[in-house]
Amino acid sequence: MALLEVKDLNTGYGPIQALWSVSLNVENKGITTLLGANGAGKSTFLSCIVGLQKLWSGDIIFDNKSITKIKANKRTDQGISLVPEGRRIFFDMSVKENLIMGAFAPNAREKMSESFEEVYAMFPVLKERTGQRAGTLSGGEQQMLAIARALMARPKLLMLDEVSTGLSPVLTTMVMDTLAKIGDTLPILVVEQAVEKALEISHTAYVLENGKIVMQGKSDELRQDENLRKAYMGI
């Protein structure tokens, strides 16, 4: 059974429709990726999931319960954690202070010490820089911090918006490989333009184009799709 079920989602801005009958499932394990070019509607889709964008119609079911009418702050309490595009860390706060900000839900506060051990084991460089101002970290380190902060909430589902933005190919590979390891124990939804790497680490993929799902299936199979390779990989 799916952990997240999005059914026939329609939304937009003013009179302009942005998403058209979008349906997507995230299973209880593994990585699902939503692919598409800039302006396809990927970030709008995530905004709908976390409650920042009002639906015109459709339903969002999380952990067997509809969350469509639940406010954004309460959706986080349900176990949904988002790493937004651009990281949005607190530059003037230390690494540790940023991580503490992620552990705001009651269950996360209770297990904060355990969470620190887990994220520091996953990202040793953050432990080395625990007292350092986040704004002085490299781009790759800032992305690691953004992911670690989201994990401090002890989510049931981790979502990431354009995690490779601003990263070199080497750092993109490093971050994606880390997500692959996290995905062994935590369901992940990755929204990404780096198509080839996202398909490599994911199990299921959807392609969003002009606000509509135009392709979906197993990631291994989509990697071999000639139309997808031409349109998004330049092959």
Image (cartoon, rainbow, N blue to C red):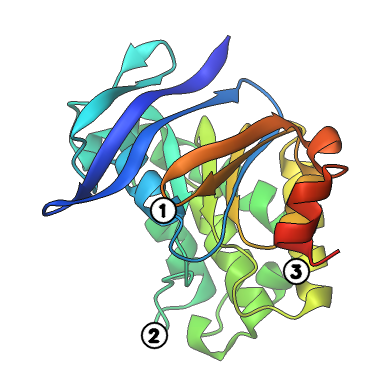
Mark positioned earlier in the residue sequence (3 or 2)? 2
Contact check, label 2 and label 1, Cβ < 8 Å: no
Task: Tell me the SS state at disc 2.
Answer: loop
Is residue 231 visible in this depiction of the protein?
yes
- Seen in the image, is 170 located left or right of residue 63? right
Amino acid type indicated by mark 1: Gly
Question: Closer to the camera, 101 or 15?
Answer: 15
Amino acid residing under circle 2:
Asp
Amino acid tagged 3: Thr
Q: SS of the residue at dot 1?
A: loop
Write the residue at 34% across / 43% down: 19
Query: What crowding class fits label 1: few (fewer than 14 Cα within 10 Å), some (14-19), or many (20 or more)?
Result: many
* CA distance for labels 2 and 1: 32 Å
Quick one: label 3, few (<14), some, or many (20+) residues within 10 Å? some
In this view, the residue in front, 199 or 115, is 199
Residue identifier under label 3: 172
Q: Is mark 3 on a helix, strand or loop?
A: helix
Point 24% across, 34% down: residue: 74
**For mark 1, what is the residue?**
41
Percent across and percent down for residue 230 are: 78, 59
